[in-house]
Image (spheres, grey):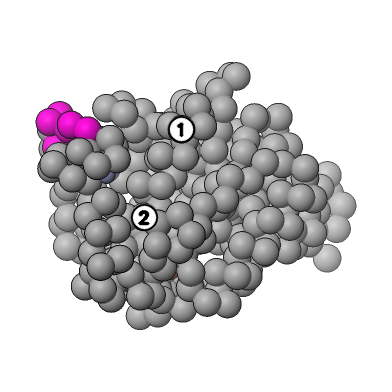
Amino acid sequence: MTKCRRCKGPAVIDIRRHNAAFCTDCFLHHCREQVRKSIHDFRMIAEGERVLVAVSGGKDSLALWDILLDMGYDADGVYLGLGIGDYSNESHRMSRAYADKRGAKLVEIELRDDFGFDIPTGSKAARRVPCSACGLSKRHLFNKAAIDGGYDVVATGHNLDDEAAVLFGNVLRWATDYLGRQLPVLPGEHGFPRKVKPLVRLGEREMAAYCVLRGIDYIVEECPMAEGNKHLGYKEALNAIEEQSPGSKAAFYFGFLDRASAMFTPQAVAERVDLKPCSSCGAPTTGDVCAFCNLVVKATR
Ligand code: FES
Ligand code: ZN
């Protein structure tokens, strides 16, 4: 039987990337340590700061919230209802159930009730790909919820697999503007809260195992609108490489952060300088009306 690297007891999970196996307690400890290291190394959250966790009811965001609460952070959740049928109902239910179980505060926003549209019909009316309308709404409304609620930082559950897949896609197309912004921490400035990704040192499989071992119920289905999403293909390609040589994903992503990302940041910074308040909602934007207010108009006409 494989032994736990830390306590030598029977192991329940092995992580080839670290060439290590762990028992339940030591695995949970490992996950918290990886988050602690990310927060420390990238200066994500300072002592006493208030954190808003973007929660989808999936394994990553619930695990992140759980870890931050266990580490003693002042962390509330924010849930955005996208109106994508059963998927949204289920993800709302999972988010609510976790918040109730922990006695934690969950800020709930419903696109349909609060803004008069949902992703399936609104994206069609606005002639946008659902995922782009969805991403835009999330960015805007999480920022707004953080500013309105006096939070210092928005934390999202992007894990190593997500970040490596996005990086892979951006490198394939040499999308230099995106490469300049693909950081585990985006500073809070120009009216935006700081954005952090404390799970960048943990993989998809680790997050699923974390939830199972902690008894956290999460929504397993992926969003039905994301079907054919290019990132899924990039993930499969990277998984095939990882299978051949464990550690490739982490080397790819952290190598980029250490040795390449700085080359692309000046361009991203330059894009942020001439921001002014949206004439409709006050959020920082480069145009007269921000992209979200624009979407609301088109999605509800
Ligand atoms: Fe955003 Fe599916 S979660 S379109
Ligand atoms: Zn606006």
User: On residue 148, which mark appears?
Assistant: 1
Residue 270 colored in magenta in the image: no
The one of 208 and 126 positioned closer to us in this rendering: 126
* Residue under label 2: 137
Residue found at x 79% / y 50%:
101
Tag 1: amino acid = Asp
Q: Crowding at label 1, few (<14), some or many (≥20) Cα neighbours within 10 Å?
A: few
Is any atom of residue 262 visible in this view? no
Q: Can you give x and y, in whole percent of width and height, for residue 193 in the image?
A: 39, 32
Tag 2: amino acid = Ser
Q: Can you give x and y, in whole percent of width and height, for residue 1 in the image?
A: 83, 65
Range of the magenta residues? 271-277
The one of 212 and 195 positioned closer to us in this rendering: 195
Residue found at x 76% / y 50%:
100
Q: Is residue 195 above or below residue 23?
A: above
Instruction: Tell me if 282 is positioned left or right of 173 in this view.
Output: right
